[in-house]
């Protein structure tokens, strides 16, 4: 395990012993068994875990849906009490949206993306693992509330004041707020690493415009998660603070405003629909060309549509709030924007139809589900345009028409393509083919059952039946429609059961699949079936959008090690780091191996979550510290640490290891994380200015309680620290590391000075955080600055220590550049906080 | 500076997001600006659409349209001067700028027909 990279084997020249190469790679990448299986960080295994867990939650969500349909099947039913019914409907929506749709699609992306772009793993494997454990623990905590009959019951959007402590005094809302925030750590983790993996780890030659369309869709989805989820995280934190500590962010009497919750929720909630739709559309754009036997018509048009959808979807959130009393002109802006989003969606539909029209479609099982998608989704899209019209929206607001529309979009737009994709990639997962007979029965029962349920529900809604009522009188004229919907629901369940049965049985009874069974063009089919832990024995140069159509021999040459990085004797997990635009090789990325730290960190975070739920705050504080220590210990085994890269040498002509450069993927991961952080911060600023401008009982004091001198001193220390850090990095770029350790300790000290002064400003302000929202929101802003300042100081302190250990220096200059990203962010946000909270109120007044 | 200039070149894929970012900035400006204007200086409802608020929102919108239209033309021209990856980038960017221009025009239309703050 000490030799260096061999020269890349010239094409056509077989390595001496391909089997030995497989064995060597397996030794490095292979998964452990038994208890150590909990340490696995490999994307294939974790992607499967995400998907299997997602399907379990789907079954729970589906069961809840059947309970709802049973209750509504007949008028005047008392199958469930109103409170249980509210819990069941709330949890149905919550489980399906947060515990099934997003994690399932993320799981598919985690599984597929490296295989499609010619990489051996995702770029932050331990982050994948942390994400999975957070998802699992958060999901268990949330669903456990059902067992306790304490589930949230305020609707999956948790509108205040219904979800506030006055009207929901139990633990239900807390389960939702804490559980969902926990699960969102998982979504954000996956979002960050998918973005960086797609941009920086595509195989050699795969320029941006040659990238598989599925990767474009996932890139957009991941960026949308990064930007779209933080507003809800902020909202959840504020609402939990209101419920637990009495800070009145959403309470009018205390200077808050319940509509702020709606803004924060839908700032997340509407993009969420497209976060779910885009990957599903990516499946459609991948499958249709394969089954039509020709390249997609208008690759560039699809890229255009993806980017447009991603952006416009953030400009629609107010169309969920047309009835709350927003001025007509503002409603018209959102109405127009809501119609605009139909344009990119229509472009994709026409591209798919044109591809089918010009190709020779084969009606295999996955294509049935694609056709089902096209029919249902187009109908859902059309009712979406109807709902974008303000007068119509007012008419059907909060009726079953909206429920029907939402299910047409979400089930048609996500579930049907998902099943198509699962059937398509099933041979890759298992090496076996599904049953066409069972699959077709499953499809038709699901398709007929779905339309019976939800097409009829449009009528129920137009007849005026409101959402979220547990029962209705016999004389309302809704009986027959509800009965038909319920029968349809059970037919659909039978169809889904058949599909799941097919999936389960095929692992044992399915026919063995031949290589590339659908004659597909994608690189994922160059993997073995089922795939190895390292995906590719050697990494090919790909300069086409259709690698397997242009070179059907690619799977063999890859397996024989005829391409790059066909070596394992150095003991590293490695793959290419490439230029995000051109796909030219920049460096060798070395990845960490299996680790307990993600599991331990997630367990500590679960303790935080449970202790907050049970109001055991001292335990929560201890668990936060423990989680922090686990995460810092995890970060210690990085870069030039012997466990991260046992042998840093590379062969002459090969690029350096990423930890020996100034532009590794960690830098990109930090940038994307700061993007998410920035979205959180902007949402906070939005909240501050919103309450200041709109809240009817907002009380701005005559004199700001914050010491401007103190804040200026703190900001000065922070800015000087950041300046010194920039100077250090500039030196590292020129291979100078004299005084690096001392410099890092000095910068860290400045960070602690900033934290101390900010803490003094906060404590001396004497804020009445439970009495008015002004003081409460100031407290949150300063706490944010304190957390970031403290984190920057601690990470810089660790850098100083790592210099001493020889893990950081001119030979390994990477990590200070990553920490500097945080410092830059801290400087910018701190001064904005000073300006918004301390200077503007002095200038403008109340 | 060299890197910044490279990224601002019309064949750089950063332009995939600049147009719609400008659209988003415009959207937030008119929505937020309208809300703030209604708090600070709500016009008399009798004035109809002939108010300072409408005029300001319209001016901001026209400025956004002009900028986005210029970038559309720039990217389209640039796509003709290149081939392969660079042409692809400029062509897609031109389409996205065009859509953004159309998006501002379409979403701004209510400004000339609906009075503010009602």
Image: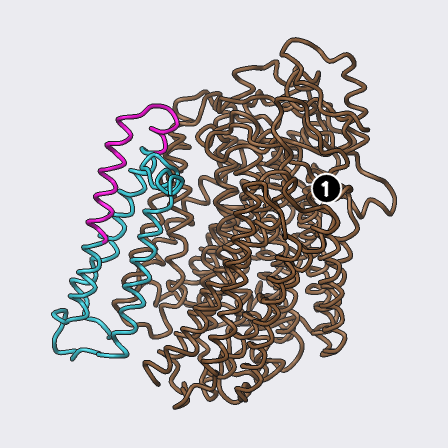
A771 in relation to A274, above or below: below
Of A386 and B56, nearer the camera is B56
Of A362 and A764, nearer the camera is A764
Question: Residue A345 appears at what percent x and percent y?
Answer: 38, 43
A713 in relation to B6, above or below: below
* Residue B19 as seen in the image, left or right of residue A73: left
Using the image, name the chain to which the residue with label 1 belongs.
A
The magenta stretch spans residue B67: yes
Of A452 and A396, nearer the camera is A396
Q: Is residue A424 visible?
A: no
For label 1, the residue is: A592
- The chain painted cyan is B
- Residue in the image at 82% along x and 44% along y: A37
- Residue in the image at 43% along x and 77% along y: A837
The magenta stretch spans residue A557: no
Residue, far front? A738
Name the colour assigned to chain A in the rendering: brown
Question: Residue A438 appears at what percent x and percent y?
Answer: 66, 34
Range of residues picked out in magenta: B64-89
Secondary structure predominantly adopted by residues drawn in magenta: helix
Query: Quadrant of the image for the N terminus of chain A?
Result: top right
User: Where, by quadrant of the figure, is residue A433 drawn?
Assistant: top right
Of A430 and A799, nearer the camera is A799
How many tags in the picture? 1
Q: Is residue A436 visible?
A: yes
Question: Residue A498 appears at what percent x and percent y?
Answer: 67, 41
For label 1, count other residues whose C-alpha is less than 10 Å away and answer few (under 14), some (14-19) or many (20+).
many
Query: Quadrant of the image for the C terminus of chain A?
Result: bottom left
């Amino acid at each position: 395990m000490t030799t260096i990279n061999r020269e890349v084997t010239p094409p056509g020249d077989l390595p001496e012993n391909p089997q030995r190469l497989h064995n060597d790679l397996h030794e490095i990448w292979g998964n452990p068994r038994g208890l150590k299986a909990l340490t696995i960080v490999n994307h294939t295994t974790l992607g499967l875990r995400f998907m299997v867990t997602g399907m379990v939650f789907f079954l729970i969500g589906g069961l809840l849906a059947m309970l709802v349909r049973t209750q509504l099947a007949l008028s005047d039913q008392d199958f469930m009490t109103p409170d249980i019914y509210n819990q069941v409907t709330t949890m149905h929506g919550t489980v399906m949206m947060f515990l099934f749709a997003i994690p399932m699609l993320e799981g598919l992306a985690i599984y597929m993306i490296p295989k499609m772009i010619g990489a051996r793993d995702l770029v932050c494997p331990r982050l994948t693992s942390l994400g999975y454990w957070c998802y699992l623990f958060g999901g268990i905590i949330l669903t456990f509330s059902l067992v306790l009959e304490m589930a949230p019951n305020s609707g999956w959007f948790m509108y205040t004041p219904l979800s506030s402590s006055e009207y929901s005094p139990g633990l239900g809302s807390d389960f939702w707020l804490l559980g969902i925030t926990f699960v969102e750590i998982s979504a954000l983790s996956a979002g960050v690493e998918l973005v960086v993996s797609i941009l920086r780890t595509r195989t050699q030659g795969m320029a941006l415009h040659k990238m598989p369309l599925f990767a474009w869709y996932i890139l957009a989805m991941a960026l949308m998660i990064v930007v779209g989820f933080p507003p809800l995280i902020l909202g959840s934190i504020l609402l939990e603070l209101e419920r637990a500590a009495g800070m009145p962010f959403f309470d009018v009497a205390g200077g808050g405003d319940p509509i702020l919750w709606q803004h924060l929720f839908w700032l997340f909630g509407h993009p969420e629909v497209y976060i779910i739709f885009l990957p599903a559309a990516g499946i459609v754009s991948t499958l249709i060309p394969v089954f039509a036997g020709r390249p997609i018509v208008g690759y560039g048009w699809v890229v255009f549509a993806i980017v447009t959808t991603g952006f416009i979807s953030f400009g629609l959130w107010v169309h969920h709030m047309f009835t709350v009393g927003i001025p007509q002109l503002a409603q018209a802006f959102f109405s127009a924007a809501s119609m605009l989003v139909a344009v990119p969606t229509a472009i994709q539909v026409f591209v798919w139809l044109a591809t089918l029209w010009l190709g020779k479609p084969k009606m295999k099982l996955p294509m049935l589900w694609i056709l089902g998608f096209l029919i249902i989704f187009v109908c859902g899209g059309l009712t979406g345009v109807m709902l974008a019209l303000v007068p119509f929206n007012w008419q059907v607001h909060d009726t079953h028409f909206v429920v029907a529309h939402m299910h047409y979009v979400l089930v048609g737009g996500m579930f049907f393509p998902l099943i198509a994709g699962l059937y398509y990639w099933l041979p890759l997962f298992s090496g076996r083919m599904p049953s066409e007979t069972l699959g077709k029965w499953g499809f038709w029962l699901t398709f007929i059952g779905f339309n019976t349920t939800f097409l009829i529900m449009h009528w129920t809604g137009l007849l005026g039946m409101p959402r979220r009522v547990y029962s209705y009188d016999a004389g309302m004229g809704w009986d027959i429609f509800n009965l038909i919907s319920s029968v349809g629901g059970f037919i659909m369940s039978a169809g889904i059961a058949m599909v799941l049965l097919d999936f389960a049985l095929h692992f044992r009874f399915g026919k063995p699949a031949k290589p590339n069974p659908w004659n597909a063009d994608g690189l994922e089919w160059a993997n073995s079936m089922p795939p190895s832990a390292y995906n590719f024995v050697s990494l090919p140069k790909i300069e086409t959008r259709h690698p397997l159509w242009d070179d059907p021999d690619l799977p063999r040459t890859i397996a024989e090690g005829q391409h790059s990085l066909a070596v394992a004797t150095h003991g590293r997990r490695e793959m290419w780091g490439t230029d995000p635009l051109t796909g030219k090789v920049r460096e060798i990325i070395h990845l960490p191996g299996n680790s307990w730290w993600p599991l331990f960190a997630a367990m500590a975070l679960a303790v935080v979550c449970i202790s907050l739920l049970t109001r055991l705050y001292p335990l929560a504080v201890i668990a936060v510290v423990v989680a922090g220590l686990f995460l810092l210990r995890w970060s210690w085994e990085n870069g030039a640490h012997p466990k991260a890269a046992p042998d840093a040498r590379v062969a002459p002509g090969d690029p350096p290891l990423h930890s020996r450069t100034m532009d590794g993927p960690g830098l990109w991961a930090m940038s994307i994380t700061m993007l998410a952080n920035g979205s959180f911060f902007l949402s906070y600023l939005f909240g501050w200015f919103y309450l200041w401008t709109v809240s009817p009982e907002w009380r701005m004091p005559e004199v700001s309680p914050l010491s401007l001198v103190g804040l200026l001193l703190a900001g000065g220390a922070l800015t000087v620290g950041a300046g010194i850090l920039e100077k250090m990095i500039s030196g590292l770029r020129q291979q100078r590391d004299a005084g690096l350790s001392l410099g890092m300790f000095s910068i860290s000290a400045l960070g602690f000075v900033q934290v101390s002064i900010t803490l003094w400003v906060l404590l001396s302000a004497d804020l009445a955080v439970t009495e008015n929202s002004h003081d409460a929101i100031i407290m949150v802003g300063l706490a944010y600055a304190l957390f970031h300042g403290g984190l920057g100081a601690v990470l810089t302190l660790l850098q100083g220590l790592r210099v001493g250990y020889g893990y950081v220096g001119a030979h390994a200059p990477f990590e200070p550049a990553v920490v500097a990203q945080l410092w830059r962010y801290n400087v910018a946000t701190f001064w904005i906080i000073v300006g918004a909270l301390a200077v503007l109120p002095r200038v403008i007044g109340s | 500076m060299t890197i910044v200039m490279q990224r601002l070149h019309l064949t750089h894929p950063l332009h995939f997001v600049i147009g719609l970012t400008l659209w988003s900035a415009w959207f937030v400006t008119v929505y937020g600006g309208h809300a703030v204007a209604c708090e600070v200086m709500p016009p008399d409802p009798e004035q109809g659409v002939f108010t300072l608020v409408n005029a300001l929102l319209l001016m901001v919108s026209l400025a956004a349209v002009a900028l986005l239209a210029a970038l559309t033309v720039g990217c389209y021209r640039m796509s003709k001067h290149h081939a392969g990856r660079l042409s692809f980038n400029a062509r897609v960017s031109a389409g996205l700028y065009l859509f953004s221009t159309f998006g501002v025009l379409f979403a701004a239309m209510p400004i000339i027909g609906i009075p503010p703050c009602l």
